[in-house]
Structures are given as C-alpha cells and as structure tokens.
Amino acid sequence: MDENNIYNNNPQQNDNSGSAGNNTVFPDPVYNDPQADRNTYGGNGGQPSRGPEQGSGFAIASLVLGIVSIVLFCASINIVTGILGIIFGAIYLVKKYPEKRGMALAGLILSIISIALYVILLIIGIATGISAINSLDYYNTF
C-alpha cells in the first residue's frame, strides 16, 4: 500500500483488513471532518479572540502594588507604590478587559486606602508635633 494514498477514498487501495470482502475506507480528514466548519475564532464576529494574558499584567501589578502599599503605609514608600497601583488599576479598568477585573479593582482600592491612611497618619503626626512644641513653650515661660 502506498503511504501517500492512505486517505484516498478508493476502496481497492484502502483495504486494511487483509480480506477481499471487507473494504474499510479511511475518511478524508480535510473534507469529512464534522468539526471543520466550526468557528475557530471564539464566536466573536470572526475576530480572533485575544488570549487570557493580554493586559493582565496591569491588573497583577495593581494588586501587588496595592498590597505592598497597604503593608508599608507607615513608610514614605507607600506614596510611590500607591500612586503606581492606582495608575495601573485605572489603566486596566479603562481598557475594559473582562478577565482579572477584580484584581485591578482590589489593587486600586488598596492603593487608595493606603494613601488615605498615610495622609491621616501624617496629619496626626503634625498635630502631635505642634501640640508638643506648644506645650514645651508653655512650660518654658515659667
């Protein structure tokens, strides 16, 4: 049997049983495939579907920076990580990628909370410092 003709629909050439009475015909994989005419582009109007990883780096970066900024809200580093977390989360949400939207939203919220905590801590520190300075001046006058 010729290896190039194993998918030929000619029963005389495709006898794989060894007997003359049983002729099995191999189907042509190109034209007889029942799944050949299915939509291979994901059913979105003929456009190729983008992979699940496209743009997800912004969501992951936003979540990681949000977590880092909430952990380090007492340090000044959280201003940088919080602002970057807000930027990356906003970019991801504006581009409207459907996957990993929750990660971007969580990173955005954590970044906002960490910056708000830092500002509150800064205000309390300034108020305490001013109060301490005023109390020293009060006791030094006597």
Image: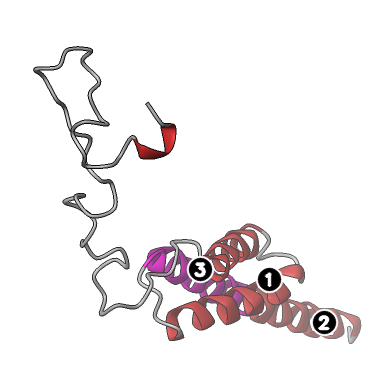
Q: Callout 3, which amino acid? A: Gln
- Decide: few, some or many residues near mark 3? Use Cα within 10 Å; few <14, some 14-19, many ≥20: few
- Please rate how many residues cluster around mark 1, counting C-alpha atoms within 10 Å: few if below 14, some from 14 to 19, many from 20: many
Q: Which mark is residue 141?
A: none
Q: Which residue is mark 2?
A: 133
Extreme residue toward the left, this view: 21
Residue 133 in percent (x, y) is at 82, 82
Would residue 36 be found to the left or right of residue 125 on screen? Answer: left
Which mark, residue 54? 3
Residue 53 among magenta residues: no
Spatial CA distance of label 3 from label 1 is 23 Å
**Earlier sequence position, callout 3 versus callout 1:** 3
For the residues labelled 3 and 1, say whether their Cβ atoms are less than 8 Å apart.
no
Find numbered disc 3 in the image and state the secondary structure of the residue it sits on.
loop
Q: Earlier in the sequence, mark 1 or mark 2?
A: 1
Give the magenta part as a residue range.
99-120
Q: Which residue is mark 1?
A: 81
Q: Disc 2 residue type?
A: Ile
Can you say which quadrant of the picture contains the N terminus? top left
